Image: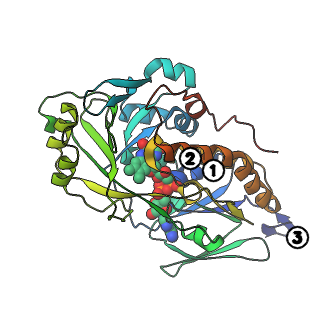
Amino acid sequence: MAHGKTVGRDVMPGPLSIAIIGAGMGGLATAAALRRVGIDVTVYEQATQFARLGAGIQIGCNAMKVLRRLGLEDRLRGGSFYPRSWNNRDWSTGEVKFDMIFGESAEEKFGAPYLLAHRGDLHAALASAVPDECIRLGHRLTGLDQITDGSVRLVFANGATATADAVVAADGVHSVVRDMLFATAPVKFTGRIAYRTTYPATLLGGERIDDCTKWWGEDRHIVIYYVKPDRSELYFVTSQPEPDFRIESWSAKGDVGELRKSFEGFHPQVGQVLAACPDVHKWAIMDRDALPRWAEGNVTLLGDACHPMTPYMAQGAAMAIEDGAVLSRCLDGAERDGVADAFRRFEATRKERTTRVQETSRANTWLRGRTNADWVYGYDAWTVPLAA
Ligand code: FAD
């Protein structure tokens, strides 16, 4: 099918134009990856500005391999913490259950470093890989139509409209595009919540904590790690039962007193971190089943929009970032009438892995005992064979 600008009597096929909905981790990584293969991208984001959310993020070696080729390795190494390991310890005795060694040996084995970052730093790095003129802030998608000529028309809450050859919906766990395309099963509340915060390490009064530790309790856990190379800032995230709180939002606040009470009796290092914590956010942990399909015609979902997961493997953003790399390979050289096939190939290449990570995450046993983590961190989205 010939599309493009008419110049004189000839039709010059312009580059494929793709609208990406959502400038989160997956949307920005995808934009940067698609630009590498000559695709014209515009990213539409509902927020009017990027906020620096108070959270840490583990950047697995598998995600780092993607980020390296997007040109972000030096920046991320320079601004993140390089842990010796992800240690797993008993909540009260401190006994080591399994110490997953990172550092140089893992870097050599898996082909990239394992880094611990401030979420805002990773997001800013990804945003730096996409020119400002490709990002439209303040554009909340409200409608989407696939037109018979193969293009897609978008409608936004601010009254703007746009047309693109195809759409990648990276609009996160509450994806409106997912709900427009498919009748999805209702969200399952796990009955658990996560408290999280970042704060300056000076508040610890000179005490130094372990690089990165998950403290495993009987029905709850807490993960604590540094997010800056000089250990100047730390982060923790918990998981614990709380049947009546159901707000899945990055901005909802929690009560520090209640949090401290719920971790009473934990190892003194946990007590120290919680005693020094000035403020905390609270997030209801939801779970969703894998979707039977990700794409419809020239529209595909990506990242949390199609495979959201519980945070227990610290791999949700990594999966969205890997998606971007694999999608760019599927679309490399595709004609306009080949986009739907490329989207199907993307789904066929990715689904088994993302479903396995979703299911493994749900079990919340990752690294609790001796674990072979090669299948997660050894994956390379740039070289993995694409589905036929
Ligand atoms: P998001 O990053 O959520 O981005 C979606 C974007 O779409 C947002 O910017 C949103 O504003 C925008 N949007 C939504 N609707 C619209 C609309 N209608 N129109 C326009 N824009 C819209 N992952 C890791 O890899 N490592 C970790 O250590 C880790 N820790 C986590 C800890 C917690 C407590 C939680 C909850 C998650 C954690 N994750 C982690 C998972 C990770 O945060 C997500 O998997 C990741 O953010 C998904 O990226 P995404 O681009 O799909 O969605």
Tag nearer the camera, 1 or 3: 1
SS at badge 2 = helix
Count of marks placed on residues: 3
Q: Give the residue number, with chain letter if any, for mark 3.
A: 9
Mark number displayed over residue 359: 2
Residue toward you, 238 or 242: 242
**Amino acid type at image mark 2:** Glu
**Amino acid type at image mark 3:** Arg
Dividing the image into 4 quarters, which one contains the N terminus?
A: bottom right
The residue at 64%/43% (across/down) is 353
Label 2 Cα crowd, 10 Å radius (few <14 / some 14-19 / many 20+): some
Tag nearer the camera, 2 or 1: 2
Single out the residue that lies furthest toward the left: 205
Tag nearer the camera, 2 or 3: 2
Ligand 1 is within 8 Å of the C-beta of the residue at disc 1? no
SS at badge 1 = helix
Of marks 1 and 3, which one's residue comes earlier in the chain? 3
Of marks 2 and 3, which one's residue comes earlier in the chain? 3
Q: Give the residue number, with chain letter if any, for mark 1.
A: 35
Q: Position of residue 238 (x, y in %)?
A: 32, 46
Q: Is 212 located above or below residue 386 in the figure?
A: above
Residue toward you, 251 or 307: 307
Q: Is residue 154 visible?
A: yes
Q: Is 387 located above or below residue 108 in the figure?
A: below
Disc 2 from disc 1: Cα separation: 32 Å
The residue at 61%/44% (across/down) is 356
